[in-house]
Amino acid sequence: MRILIVDDQRIMREGLATIIGLEPGMEVIGTAMDGQDAYAKVIEMRPDVVLMDIRMPGMDGVEGSALILKHFPETKVLILTTFDDSELIIKVLENGVHGYLLKDMPSEAIIGAIRTVYNGGTVLQHDITSMLLKEFITIADRNPDKALPAGQPEELKLLTEREKEVLALLGQGLNNKEIAGMLFLTEGTVKNHVSNLISKLGLRDRTQAAIYAVRHLP
């Protein structure tokens, strides 16, 4: 698999390139210093996986990943971040990146994550994502004008009332079992509702659905 590494710190780029380059079947085809540089390298080199820092001067990882995924949706983007970047992590998850890793993760976790996204999976640290959602809800409560757009999107009208109820509970960070208990449904029924609402809203996974709920439901 062909990998592009994006980070504004040279020592990080070179360190990651060395670690990844030692792995069988992995080739670091280039590095970039920011999101704009990354986009140019993706056009030129067409990597399979982009490993991108989230916070960089110039074009950051949020804008860079959005640009890459808009024009090269087949490219897998894996974000490197810290927990302090919670609001930025929420934004890149909305953009459709294929996962994120905290920078202090061991090298074998980074290698495993690259393999996972290359093979079509996602890399989300669910306990951290749940904490991020709770923090985002707090931000939305404090700054509703900043966090929530005016009005509700048209696609919400596609959902049944039950699907809206499930969506609202997703936004509270509940899992299928907890939602089933709240709504007196079976877990299988909840799973079907989650799949249907994700499809109707044009989202990729339940994490994007949870963020969508926080942004758009009253």
Image (cartoon, rainbow, N blue to C red):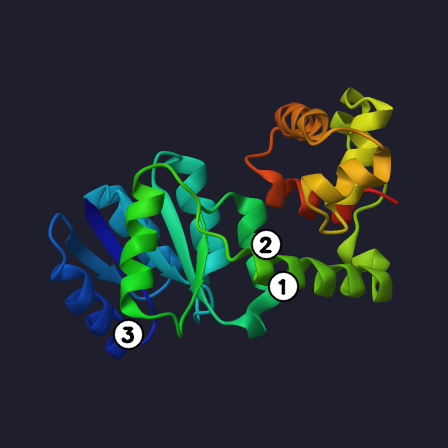
Q: Residues within 10 Å of mark 2 (few under 14, many from 20)?
A: some
- The percent position of residue 104, horizontal first and vertical second, equals 40, 75
The quadrant where residue 160 appears: top right
Q: Which residue is drawn at 35% across and 44% down?
A: 117
Q: What kind of element bears circle 1?
A: helix
Q: Name the mark on residue 87.
A: 1
- In-front residue for pair 71/124: 124
Q: Residue at x 34, y 50 (%)?
A: 39
The quadrant where residue 110 appears: bottom left
- The percent position of residue 8, horizontal first and vertical second, equals 34, 72
- The percent position of residue 55, horizontal first and vertical second, equals 47, 69
The amino acid type, in three-letter code, at marker 1 is Glu
- In-front residue for pair 68/157: 157
Determine which residue is flagged by label 3. 12
Task: Determine contact: label 2, label 3, CB under 8 Å.
Answer: no
Task: Determine contact: label 1, label 2, CB under 8 Å.
Answer: yes
Task: Determine contact: label 1, label 3, CB under 8 Å.
Answer: no
Q: Which mark sits nearer the N-terminus, 1 or 3?
A: 3
Left or right: residue 11 compared with residue 100: left
Determine which residue is flagged by label 2. 91
Is residue 98 at all visible to an observer of this figure?
A: yes
The amino acid type, in three-letter code, at marker 2 is Lys
Q: Residue at x 42, y 58 (%)?
A: 79
